[in-house]
Image: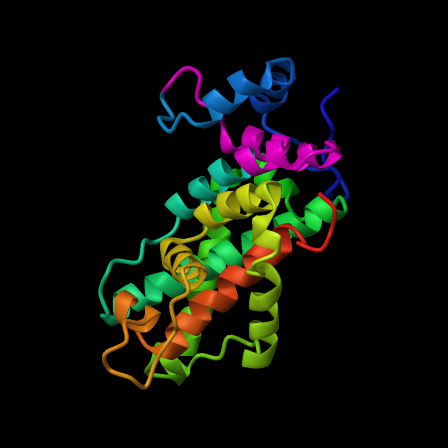
Amino acid sequence: MIVPLTKRKADGTLYQRPDIIEPLLAGLANLPRNVLLERARIRDRKHPDYLPSECLLYFVRRSRRDNSDAWFEQLYKILIERVLRSVPRAEISKDSSSLSNERIRNAVFDRFVEMLAKDRKEPDDKLDFFEVRFDLAVKRLRLDAQDRVWQEESRTASLDDESSGTSDDAAQATTTSLLDAELLTDPLFRTRFHRAIEALPIEQRRTIHLLLSGWQIDSSDPSVMTIAKALNCSEKTVRNYRDRALKALGALFNPGDDQ
């Protein structure tokens, strides 16, 4: 049985999935997981086996009933890739439009992961509309993020003036927890952790990979190659990438929990 949505409209009626989605879900639910995963990886919307994002999200949400996180993580990576393809891509440039796109992209990613993490811990109705009109729901996230970014940029002329909202001490504590060398010796945790890293936006992914390789964020020694130099940005921007990445990773799993 396909689990019904619980969110209600202003008139009190329940949200309903499109007529084409509900019967499609019923058929997909009977497929072997490897077949469903292959269909989820198809990007061409015109392909006869293309899996609508509404359906993909349904199975991501239902995976919380599993005893293992492996199935969730495989579907999650594909879902996040679809979300990121729907928002402006940040080019390797330092012009204002590229910086704006980067911030919009990060804001959409942060908000979607936050909602998904909360829904995974306890069923919520905030993602119900995404199961009804996924593209429109992501577009609304993008427009909301765009409005916030433009409002912030009207008050400041530089991305470096943005506050990540996390003290460096707190960020360092999170870094120590998630990047703990002992935790990373656990093959299961290491595999899950690296899969989650690969789902991050490219700037955040590069930052975490370099941190794991032992690179410094910045250095007073001009001969030292740092993350800031490698990414061609400021120390504050690198810390912003790090904090956003760790927030997303921490929302998906707690390395201190038994998984």
Which residue is painted at 50% across and 43% down in the image?
195
Which residue is painted at 67% across and 32% down in the image?
16
Report the side of 112 relative to 224 (left or right). Answer: right
Q: Is residue 144 visible?
A: no
Residue 87 place in picture, x, y as percent: 39, 51
Report the side of 199 relative to 226 (left or right). Answer: right
Report the side of 194 relative to 61 (left or right). Answer: left
Which residue is painted at 58% across and 42% down in the image?
187
Q: Is residue 258 above or below residue 159?
A: above
Which residue is painted at 61% across and 56% down in the image?
182
Q: Is residue 73 above or below residue 28?
A: below
Q: Report which quarter residue 48 is drawn in.
A: top left
The residue segment tinted magenta is 47-74
- Quadrant in which the N terminus is drawn: top right
34 or 184: nearer the eye? 184
Q: Report which quarter residue 240 is drawn in.
A: bottom left
Residue 146 place in picture, x, y as percent: 42, 63
243 or 54: nearer the eye? 243
